[in-house]
Image (cartoon, helix red, strand yellow):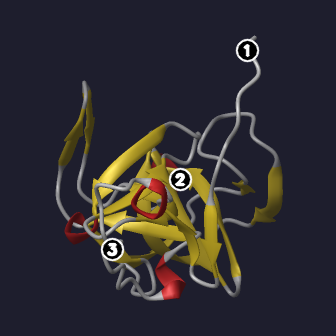
């Protein structure tokens, strides 16, 4: 539905890099991007509440990082809505928020929406590591598997 156009990108071992400084003659040298490569193309958690346009994202919201510039992640919500988030407002999900028990048998979902594809079935009583939240769902890890469960199913 759009007219023909070109996308230009620069990709490094650490992920996508903003190409504008490389082609804009007014910028003499591109700014340094000092993000550990493990934080790119990965899930991150907001460490404070952030308002983007008209959307309020609470603390502990999960985002997915696609690229970075010197100060920001170019990211998206778990449902694919694009965001630009200051790097300082994010943290790795390596450290869990807490551990909880699943109260009823529930599917581990691919996305934080009802009816999303199930990755596994978690029996009642399963202990999960809670990594963050989005849309009334908790992003959890069990063993090496990550996915989404309704927040109401974890206590």
Q: Position of residue 11 (x, y in %)?
A: 64, 70
Q: Is residue 81 above or below residue 127?
A: above
Residue 79 image label? none
Tell me if 74 is positioned left or right of 58 in this view: right
Q: Residue furthest top?
A: 1
Nearest the eye: 115 or 72: 72
Confirm or deny contact between disc 2 and disc 3 (CB under 8 A).
no
The local secondary structure at tag 3 comes to loop
Callout 2 secondary element: helix
| Residue 126 in view, yes or no | no
- For this rendering, which residue is in front, 68 or 155? 68
Q: Residues within 10 Å of mark 2 (few under 14, many from 20)?
A: some
| Residue sitting nearer the eye, 15 or 46 | 15
Observer able to see residue 19: yes
Report, in whole angstroms, how far the alpha carbon at label 2 lies from the one at label 3: 51 Å
Say which of marks 2 and 3 sits in front: 3
Specify whether 40 is left or right of 10.
left
The residue that label 1 is drawn on is 3
In front of the other: label 1 or label 2?
1
Q: Measured along the vertical axis of the image, is residue 126 above or below residue 108?
A: below
102 lies left or right of 106: left
Name the residue tied to disc 3: 29
Q: Residue at x 55, y 76 (%)?
A: 128
Residue sitting at x 65%, y 80%: 142
User: Are dots 1 and 3 in contact, CB under 8 Å?
Assistant: no
> As rendered, which of 115 and 111 lies closer to the eye?
111
Mark 2 — residue? 153
Q: Residue at x 25, y 29 (%)?
A: 53
Rendered-image quadrant of the N terminus:
top right
């Amino acid at each position: 539905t759009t007219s023909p156009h070109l996308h230009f990108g620069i990709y490094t071992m650490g992920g996508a890099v903003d190409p504008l400084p490389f082609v804009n003659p007014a910028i003499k040298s591109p700014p340094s991007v000092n993000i550990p490569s493990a934080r790119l193309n990965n899930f991150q958690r907001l460490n404070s509440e952030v308002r983007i346009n008209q959307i309020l994202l609470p603390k502990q919201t999960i985002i997915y990082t696609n690229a970075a510039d010197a100060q920001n992640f170019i990211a998206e919500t778990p449902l694919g809505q694009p965001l630009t988030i200051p790097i300082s407002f994010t943290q790795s999900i390596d450290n869990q928020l807490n551990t909880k028990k699943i109260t009823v048998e529930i599917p581990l979902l691919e996305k934080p929406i009802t009816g999303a594809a199930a990755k596994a079935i978690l029996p009642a009583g399963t202990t999960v590591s809670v990594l963050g939240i989005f849309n009334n769902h908790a992003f959890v890890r069990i063993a090496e598997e990550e996915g989404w469960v309704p927040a109401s199913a974890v206590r």
